[in-house]
Amino acid sequence: MIRKKEWISMLLAGGQGSRLYALTRKLAKPAVPFGGKYRIIDFPLSNCINSGIDTVGVLTQYQPLVLNEYLGNGQPWDLDRNNGGVFALPPYQKSSGSDWYSGTANAIYQNINFIERYDPEYVLILSGDHIYKMDYSKMLTFHKEKNADCTIAVLEVPMEEASRFGIMNADESQRVFEFEEKPKEPKSNLASMGIYIFTWSKLKKYLEQDEADPNSSNDFGKNIIPSMLADDQRMFAYAFEGYWKDVGTIDSLWEANMDLLNPIDPLKLYDPSWKIYSRNADMPPHYISKTAHVQNSMICEGSHVEGDVDFSVLFPGAVVEPGAVVRDSILMPGAVVKKNAIVEYAIIAENVVIEEGAKVGDRPENWEDKSKWGVAVVGENVHISPKAVVPPQAMIEQDV
Amino acid sequence: MRENTVLGIIFSNMHDETLGELTNVRTMGSVPFGGRYRFIDFPLSNMVNSGISNVGVVTKSNYQSLIDHIGSGREWDLARKVGGLNILPPFSNNHSGIYRGRLEALSGITDYISNNRAKYVLMADCDVISNMDYRDMIKRHISTGADITVLYQKENLAKEDLLSDTTAFGFDANGRINDVMIGPSMPGQYNVYRNVTVISRDLLSRIIADGAQHNQISFKREILQKSHDRYNIQGYESTGVSLTIHSIKSYFDANMKLLDPAVRNSIFNTQSPIYTKIKDEVPAKYGTSAKVSNSLVADGCIIDGEVENSVIFRGVQIAKGVTVKNSIVMQGATLSDGASLNYVIVDKDVLVREHRTLMGFETYPIYIAKGSVV
């Protein structure tokens, strides 16, 4: 007999993450490595357990193998529970047929049975592409205080950037009266963070209603939120203060990694009172040789540095050979940069080998035409031949 | 049916006395080593990587740190329904108590051994750092039909390496032990015992019962040395890299040897990892004035000073203006601006304040006790 839970979380992890190109060819976006030892999904999962949520359904669809293996029984996040825990929820066949998840709301709709097993009062909806530390329990308290049907976490963004986000227009009591997706002329700067708490009975009703509408695209932002607003449901904006970053694009993923190197540490990653958990690589401490120069960087256990590393993030098992230079770059697990190779402003995915003397990426100051410059990306397991040159902005998926 | 054919037994307190202050607050097994490990991680991981999934850890005293470290054994994949990890604290009945030697220690766990269903027992101590596959040794034990098989390595012992409890073997033409020296006095090449032993569980039970009746304490003296005529004791030579710890100096040297890539690669490899307790530390962060050379650095460190020829454990903070050379800095230590360390072993959670200078010598590294403020 499953015991009732006050709240559970549903984590949307099925998106393709197509704007990460080569990095998500064989990998769901939430499984993309981040910050030297983590994967993106470690952030929402750790936030859940730190906020007191012990039951998380992870909705998977696109390339789930790595993600499923990574989640395992949930033990790294203390989510291996007798009652609850973490569950990968792929689409499945039902007596009336089977469907892929057609949208964020449809993914939740197809798992109504999973949610009902815990008979929760509230459901927290999260997505697997943001880097942030957040105490969801404070948001739940707010939701209860406001007697809300839906609470949407919002972040104040600079007004000039507001047109890139879903913007919530709220009154003085934080009640939302209007939602605009990427408005040309934003009326406020409260951007939705894609984090929702719903009173479950309300959400269930709207999910069923939405499913019955053949014209709906079954999406929270496009359908569920607008129709709840249209019905004048009690919807509130919960203001979050702190570091939050969408890492859905190459540039933002690169930037978010570089933010960690800031001595001020805006994410407060080093704050032990709110740890981010991850699956461990069982590797010895990293080694910095006599010939190495390492500064302004984050380096994980299991890496091996004999060359120059500056303003970079190195994951377990990354190797930088003598004479090699890695600057303003990210080396994901097992990436090898051989002798005298140069890597600048680049994201190097897992198990890439960059042979001797090759050059990947370049510094922006060397490019007069900035439209031709950008972070270079080398996809998983790719082999870059000796002396090969990979220009900025390149997206390498095959051996060069 | 799932069965454990070999039971592993690890003695976590043997040799405690050799490390002096390092074992004041902990067992030999829980002495920190190599930036993120404890001694017991090595025999424990070796057993697990050799397919031994039932391990008993014999403790004696000061074992809180050990229990905190190994917990349920999950990090070693030893949280099992069948077998798994068992911590065996001292069990006192009318004749035993705090044990004085290995035979007495075994006598305290005699029920644990006799209730087990494994055919063989592999025993190891925590004084040898190596990455070793015990499967071949067990196979040899079975194929030679030996009563007891002991693991040894050929080693040239100089005068200072000759310790009172160094044990060396002589063999006859069939590889059977015909001589056991404890504390040899002349420098030279010896077949040195690495305190790893394979024996059938039945024979071990009989030896324990017999030993208890005759008030025998030491397995080495009473069984290996005095009874090699009675038992067929075979040697098994290991040629892999191993670092033995028998003094503060050898502890210091063993840590430093990890800076040698050949040693490091033979002890740590991805096919047979050494497991340890996970601390969920953030990767190490290097600041603008960091200058690091020939050093091992674990996760959770924040480094803004100079570090050379050193082993830095998890969560150590090294401020700008600090110089650390030829030193071992254990978990959670903080070195403040202007501090200078050379040939120092800094135990856990030590605070070294601004502009303090601590200097040992290569042959005599100084030790700063756990939790001290300098």
Image: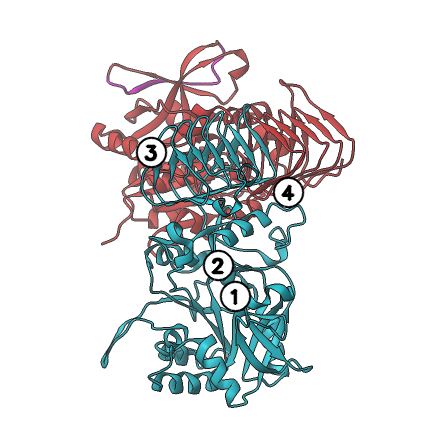
Chain colours: A cyan, B red
Spatial CA span between label 1 and label 2: 9 Å
Q: Chain of mark 1?
A: A
Circle 1 SS class: helix
Spatial CA span between label 2 and label 3: 31 Å
Residue interval drawn in magenta = B174-185
Give percent across and percent down for residue B247. Answer: 57, 25
Residue wearing tag 1: A48
Which amino acid lies under the numbered mark 4 shown in the image of this protein?
Answer: Gly
Residue wearing tag 2: A77
Q: Are marks 3 and 4 in contact (CB under 8 Å)?
A: no
**Considering depth in this image, is A343 or A277 the residue closer to the camera?**
A343
Examine the image and state in which quarter residue B236 appears: top left
Which amino acid lies under the numbered mark 1 shown in the image of this protein?
Answer: Cys
Residue wearing tag 4: B332
Which amino acid lies under the numbered mark 2 shown in the image of this protein?
Answer: Trp
Residue located at (69% from left, 22% from top): B360
Residue located at (49% from left, 25% from top): A323
Residue B179 visible, this orientation: yes
